[in-house]
Image (cartoon, helix red, strand yellow):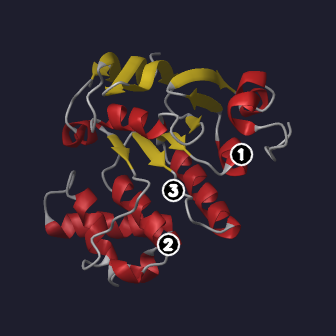
Amino acid sequence: MKPLLQVHDATKHFGGLTAVNQVTLALDEGEILGLIGPNGAGKSTLFNMISGTYRPDGGTVRFAGEDITGTPPHLICQRGLARTFQIVKPFANLTVVENVMVGSFLRRGRVQESEQRARQVLEFVGLSPYADQPAHNLTTAGRNRLELARALATEPRLLLLDEVMAGLTPTESRGIVSLIQKIRESGVTLLVIEHVMKAIMTLSDREAVLHHGELIAVDTPSEITRNPEVITAYLGGDHDAPRH
């Protein structure tokens, strides 16, 4: 069986800077792959190439067996690949359910059907009590869950999560970890950028490590925490990554 996502030699330049340099990785259906690395390592740039925001300067991206290299984001989303954004920007003057309906309209053309699907997703992510409130009333944790809900409403096969635990307390982060596990159990494959190391090591089946735009390791969390190159580049000898 072919991987759900295949990235081959993906490269992106910004002027004289090579932000991502010949990155090759694959993601199997049902897997959670963590994408880690220092700030500026190229993680978000890689996300942007996979999701269609950036066209690669070299290499290819294949999803579900089809070449989607440089395909516009809305068409990639229609094929079943959705993403969240690190900087969450809900439609502040719309209600929470109306925000999620923006995503559910991709598959549900009628307003009533779209709203019904949006409310189902809000129940799934734990935001049902806030469905009819303005989105600007939500806390940081609530907005992060809303960002997840909007993406889930598009009914993706593959979901790219860009630091959905940013700005959260440890308790709130644990809640997001549980939610991500529930998303995987529902049949969605996940590629996750995260700086909360304890969380990403707990969640992921494998970790891919970027450094200066290059992929330096792909392995299980237990092996990544023992990889000398990764430790030097990112984790650091005294990092509190979980011991396995």
Q: Nearer the viewer, residue 50 or 228?
A: 228
In the displayed structure, 165 sits above or below 235; it is below
Q: In the rendered image, is residue 64 in sight?
A: no
**On the picture, is 166 further left or further right than 85?**
right
| Foreground label between 2 and 1 | 2
Q: Nearer the viewer, residue 214 or 201?
A: 214
The C terminus: image quadrant:
top right
Residue 55: percent from the left, percent from the top? 26, 28
The residue that disc 3 covers is 164
Amino acid type shown at disc 3? Val
The residue that disc 1 covers is 202
Residue 223: percent from the left, percent from the top? 77, 26
Cα–Cα span, label 1 and label 3: 15 Å
State the residue at coordinates (40%, 51%).
Answer: 84
Cα–Cα span, label 3 and label 2: 10 Å
Image disc number at residue 10: none
- Crowd tier of the residue under label 2, counting other residues whose Cα lies within 10 Å: few below 14, some 14–19, many 20 or above: some
Determine the residue located farthest toward the left in the rendered image.
110
Q: Nearer the viewer, residue 116 or 167?
A: 167
Q: Secondary structure at mark 3?
A: loop
Q: Secondary structure at mark 1?
A: helix
The residue that disc 2 covers is 140
Amino acid type shown at disc 2? Thr
Q: Secondary structure at mark 2?
A: helix
Determine the residue located farthest toward the front in the rendered image.
16
Cα–Cα span, label 2 and label 1: 23 Å
- Crowd tier of the residue under label 1, counting other residues whose Cα lies within 10 Å: few below 14, some 14–19, many 20 or above: few
Q: Earlier in the sequence, mark 3 or mark 2?
A: 2
Is the C-beta separation of discs 1 and 3 under 8 Å?
no
Residue 69: percent from the left, percent from the top? 27, 23
Q: Earlier in the sequence, mark 2 or mark 1?
A: 2
